[in-house]
Image (tube, rainbow, N blue to C red):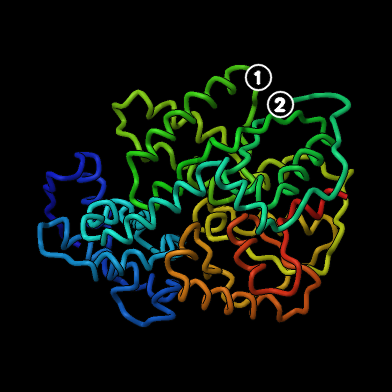
Amino acid sequence: MHVELNQLSISELDNEKASQIIEACVHCGFCLATCPTYQLIGDELDSPRGRIYLIKSALENNQFSTKSLKHLDRCLTCRSCETTCPSGVEYGQLLEIGREFMESKRTKLQTIHRFYVRKLLLTPLLFKSVGYFVRHSSIATKSIKPQNVESTVLLLSGCVQPTLAPNINHSIKNILAKLSVNVIESPQRECCGAMEQHLAASKNALKRVKRNIDSWSTQLNSGVSVIISSASGCGVMVKDYPVLFEKTDPYYEKAKFISSKTQDIAEYLASKDLTGLRLSESNISYHEPCTLQHGQKLGGLVESILAQFGYEKKPIKDSHICCGSAGTYSIFEAEISNQLKENKLQNLKVSNPEMIVTSNIGCLIHLQKGSSIPVKHWVELLDG
């Protein structure tokens, strides 16, 4: 797709990045078949190809409106299109640039709403007081300490997970203790920055990212071997830190270092001897988050680990399609989000599972709202 950008209101890095991404698109339309919103709405402007046209037009100084912004808002940033695209179009990065550029068309009411949602979710003192009343689960087992410490890891606690489902991080610490791994858990206030980045608050996100890089680099240089994320949404954000910086920026190499040291909990456990663990429930249906299969390109990894304990993989219709959670998407685009949730649960329940498991706190909470079947993080099944 030919493009000529010289948009003065965005950075040189974003101009160059947007130009390269748009030019990589060859109009093939493969993305339409895997786009959740296009499948539901049927409007090409609610597909990756259509949104690329909208962003291109806006960045070429053509008129755009609140309707254009609405089409971008409807995107779940699931990146399923990136998995499908034969040209390797990095659509997710372009979408962030487009959203930031079109943010000026947002209504004052929407801006205020988004601001307060961000502040609530990213301020632990506030969120704990509210989140406690909608807590999904409490800690279910006793704490275990490693008898012999062979290594130390940094576990990213997440901004909402410790409040809504504290048993997830608790289970990970117990599992790693059995593997002789000492765990340092990051403070809840150390959000990865994804929420602000996806809500067109990139300046706030960048400040947070830099603080994280400085803090985590110090820990990695002081005995911590790996950074572990149990929320796949956080994991893909941290792994993508380098794309936020120009190569001449001192933080670029630091970001690459952090990214190279970050692993999803499934990645970390895949290289370990897990014979001392057991699976507490095998009649399960697994939902693979978009951020794990499309963002981190780790499709099938969790199920390969669960298979070691007797789990038999069950085919899930449209397993590549988003469940509708997508961070704060379920708050701001509730109608589409709920429809995707209903579709996903219908497909997950076909095999009559006793439990649904996933790899991301957002998916977990979202799916549980519509399901009478318990929904848990898969690592919780190994802490028994």
Q: Amino acid at mark 2?
A: Thr
Q: Residue at x 35, y 23 (%)?
A: 250
Q: Residue 150 location, x and y as percent?
A: 78, 24
Q: Amino acid at mark 1?
A: Gly
Q: Residue at x 45, y 73 (%)?
A: 36
Question: Badge 2: how crowded within 10 Å, few (<14), some, or many (20+)?
Answer: some
Question: Badge 1: how crowded within 10 Å, few (<14), some, or many (20+)?
Answer: few
Viewed as shown, does residue 146 lie left or right of 101? Answer: right
Residue 173 quadrant: top right
Asked if the residues shown at circle 1 and circle 2 are in contact, with their CB atoms under 8 angstroms apart, the answer is yes
The dot on residue 223 is: 1
The dot on residue 152 is: 2
Q: Is residue 169 above or below residue 350?
A: above
Distance from label 1 to label 2 (Cα)?
7 Å
Q: Residue 245 location, x and y as percent?
A: 33, 34
Q: Secondary structure at mark 1?
A: loop
Residue 65 quadrant: bottom left
